[in-house]
Image (cartoon, helix red, strand yellow):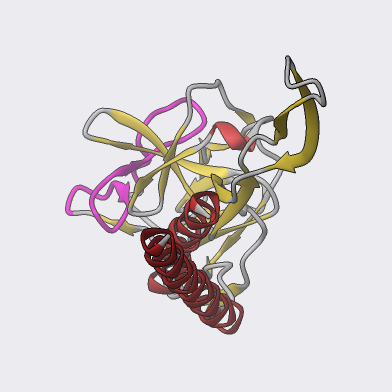
Amino acid sequence: MLRGLYSSFAGMRAWLFRQDVVANNLANVSSNGYKQDLAVFRSFPSRSMVALKGDESGAGSRVQPLGPYTGGVLLGEVRTDFSQGALEETGVPTDLALEGEGFFAVRRGGQLLYTRNGSFHLDARRYLVTSDGAEVLDENGDPIRAEGELVVGEDGTLTVDGQARGRLGIYAFDDPGSLRKVGDGYFTSALAPRRAGGRVVQGYLEASNVNAVDQMVKMIEGLRAYESNQRLIQAQDRTLERLVNQTGKV
């Protein structure tokens, strides 16, 4: 009976964590370049249950297998879905989108970060920066300055007033799982990146890859699963209460 209570509690906790993940996805459905998170469940390690029974002579005991017991589920990990988001035209020359693999490299407060959000602009000193002021970097790790008309080729080449100014820093990782979200659409990684082969599209932004309808369905599904586990706990509690009361009458 107590195992049933623990299993239902574990289920409630796992579904509650999943609801938090879904809610965060919905909150970022309009965030440029946002990559949705996926909650992955896993079961508790399986354990074999046995019963010890005395033999016919009354001496010793024998083991009777009762089968495996898993003890419910838990949230194993939260994975990021790096699938492509839709490209939306803005017509703004400093708006850049990536089609295919890769991340823009930026520097914020001395920290190297990576992002798919290409909503950039030129600051007062004519440096290309993100909406929160992080410097957009070229392939050499230097900030990009454009004193004239900036044109970005599909391969990331930079030209200002027709003069070549290097190439945009676009990087990919052989193990995307090494990327860790640090907020505001930024990622960090302990692994060294490589040059990416994605296509740069000027005057466009990549939308979030969150499907709002799909996330709403998951939200409802999670609510129903949470309520089901809650009702199971209530039913087991009533059964346990009756058992205690009956035992007290013996």
In this rendering, the answer to whether 142 lies above or below 217 is above
Q: Nearer the viewer, residue 21 or 247?
A: 247
Image coords of residue 247 (percent x, y): 43, 59
Q: Which residue is situated farthest in the left direction here?
A: 124
Q: Is residue 63 visible?
A: yes
Of 87 and 151, the residue lying toward us: 87
Q: Position of residue 190 (x, y in %)?
A: 48, 22
Is residue 66 inside the magenta stretch? no
Residue at horizontal 72 percent and vertical 32 percent from the top: 50
In the displayed structure, 19 sits above or below 199; it is below
Q: Position of residue 6 (x, y in %)?
A: 48, 51
Identity of the residue drawn at 48% across and 74% down: 235
Q: Is 198 situated above or below 122?
A: above
Q: Which residues are magenta?
A: 124-145
Seen from this angle, which residue lies furthest front? 57
Residue 9 located left or right of residue 45? left
> x%, y% of residue 135?
31, 41
Q: Quadrant of residue 13?
A: bottom left
